[in-house]
């Protein structure tokens, strides 16, 4: 297996010029409403009034989770049930009665999250376990046991965020770090974000955060009321993208409850190319049990991609990748196997940094 490196034109510039779908960060306000901020413009673009929610007004303590696929906002209420409403009309959606929820009654303080990859609704419980419901029919699936979280049991106050690209979930640990795990195998990936890579004082496991899959960022609430970032490619401290003064109402610091209305597109296997953690993975062909593959790794310091390909023989052809502004297709050059050059044609999935593998052939 041989690896060759060479430079290609910075297609990141091409991506950045696209017209992305609106990315709205929703937050709970002290007047009982939930408001949305366009992350790009810092302007307010949505307000869900307190009257749209069932139960007593809980102000900035409203726990909720946005489901971009169904266009729903799920929330917990003071009667201990879980409800939903449609983002665009504020009409009531499906609900889960309190008698289906595990543990003690905690009303609107129950934390709620969405696993985008598996289409699961995640609810915290007083035992420390995570209850999971299928968003399709609201049937219950296996829970994440409290024993998995070895950093300490914080009951129903666990904070989670799903990465729809990888299928992994991050959680806030009691030492102030973020830790990534696979919810199917219940194993940690080994990727952690230490408290030292974050701004503000250490809130332990009580920091609220979301994943921005388009920009490969973890967005988290800071104790000064702002929203800052950690690039998931480097896991080092990033920039602050929203200052506290863009939010309305009292400043809840790192306890600011946030959720993201953002396009989620999963990439990966079976003929799809995926952009995750600054790596664009392109599956090619399996020939004679030898898999031909390509990786484009984005180098943010130099603002370009390093093109690496892996092949079964020592023959390579050094040719640049090409992008057509007319067709929107990215042509990845030959990967040579036994004297035959295989190439890939990719088409960007609108509004994301993911691609579909349009064709794999010879030339």
Image (cartoon, rainbow, N blue to C red):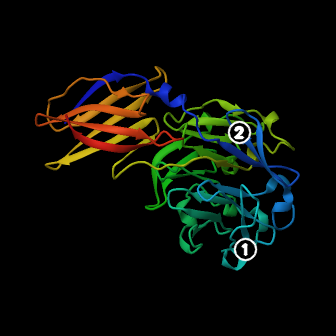
The residue singled out by tag 1 in the image is 104
Q: Which residue is mark 2?
A: 38
Taking the spot 84% from the left edge, 55% from the top edge, the residue there is: 49
Q: Earlier in the sequence, mark 1 or mark 2?
A: 2
Residue 102 occupies which quadrant of the picture?
bottom right
Q: Which mark is residue 130?
A: none
Specify few, some or many for label 1: CA neighbours under 10 Å numbering under 14, 14-19, or 20 or more.
few
Q: What percent of the width, then of the height, locates residue 317?
A: 20, 26
User: 290 or 181, which is in the foreground?
Assistant: 290
Q: Is residue 314 left or right of residue 224?
A: left
Mark 1–mark 2 CB contact (< 8 Å):
no
**Element type where label 2 sits in the image:** strand
Q: Is residue 339 visible?
A: yes
User: What x and y, as percent, mark residue 303?
Assistant: 47, 22
The answer to which quarter of the image holds residue 326 is top left
> Residue 238's x, y, as percent?
60, 31
Q: CA distance from mark 1 to mark 2?
A: 37 Å
Element carrying mark 1: loop
Residue found farthest to the front: 326
**Outermost residue to the left:** 338
Question: Callout 2 environment at 10 Å: few (<14), some (14 to 19), or many (20+)?
Answer: some
């Amino acid at each position: 297996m041989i690896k060759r490196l060479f430079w290609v034109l910075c297609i990141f510039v091409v991506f950045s010029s696209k017209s992305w779908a609106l990315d709205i960060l929703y937050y709970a306000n002290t007047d009982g409403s939930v408001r949305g901020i366009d992350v790009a413009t810092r302007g307010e673009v949505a307000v869900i009034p307190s009257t749209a929610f069932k139960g007593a007004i809980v102000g900035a303590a409203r726990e909720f989770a946005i489901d971009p696929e169904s266009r729903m906002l799920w929330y917990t209420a003071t009667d201990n049930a879980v409800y939903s409403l449609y983002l665009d009309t504020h009409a009531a959606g499906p609900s889960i009665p309190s008698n289906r929820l595990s543990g003690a009654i905690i009303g609107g303080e129950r934390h709620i999250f969405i696993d985008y990859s598996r289409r699961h609704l995640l609810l915290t419980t007083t035992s420390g376990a995570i209850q999971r419901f299928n968003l399709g029919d609201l049937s219950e699936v296996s829970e994440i046991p409290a024993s998995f979280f070895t950093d300490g049991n914080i009951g129903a106050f666990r904070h989670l965020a799903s990465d729809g690209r990888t299928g992994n979930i991050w959680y806030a640990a009691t030492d102030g770090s973020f830790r990534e795990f696979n919810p199917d195998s219940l194993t940690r990936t080994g990727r952690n974000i230490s408290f030292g890579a974050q701004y503000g004082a250490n809130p332990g496991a009580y920091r609220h955060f979301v994943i921005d899959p388009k920009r490969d960022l973890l967005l988290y609430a800071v104790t000064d009321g702002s929203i800052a970032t950690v690039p998931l490619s480097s896991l080092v401290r990033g920039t602050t993208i929203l200052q506290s003064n863009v939010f309305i109402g009292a400043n809840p610091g790192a306890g600011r409850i946030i959720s993201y209305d953002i396009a989620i597109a999963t990439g990966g296997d079976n003929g799809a190319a995926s952009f995750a953690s600054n790596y664009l993975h392109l599956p090619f062909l399996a020939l004679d049990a030898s898999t031909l593959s390509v990786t484009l790794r984005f180098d943010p310091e130099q603002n370009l991609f390093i093109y690496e390909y892996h092949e079964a023989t020592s023959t390579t052809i050094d040719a640049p990748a090409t992008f057509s502004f007319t067709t929107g297709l990215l042509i990845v050059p030959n990967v040579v196997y036994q004297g035959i050059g295989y190439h890939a044609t990719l088409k960007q999935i609108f509004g994301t940094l993911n691609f579909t593998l349009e064709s794999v052939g010879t030339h």
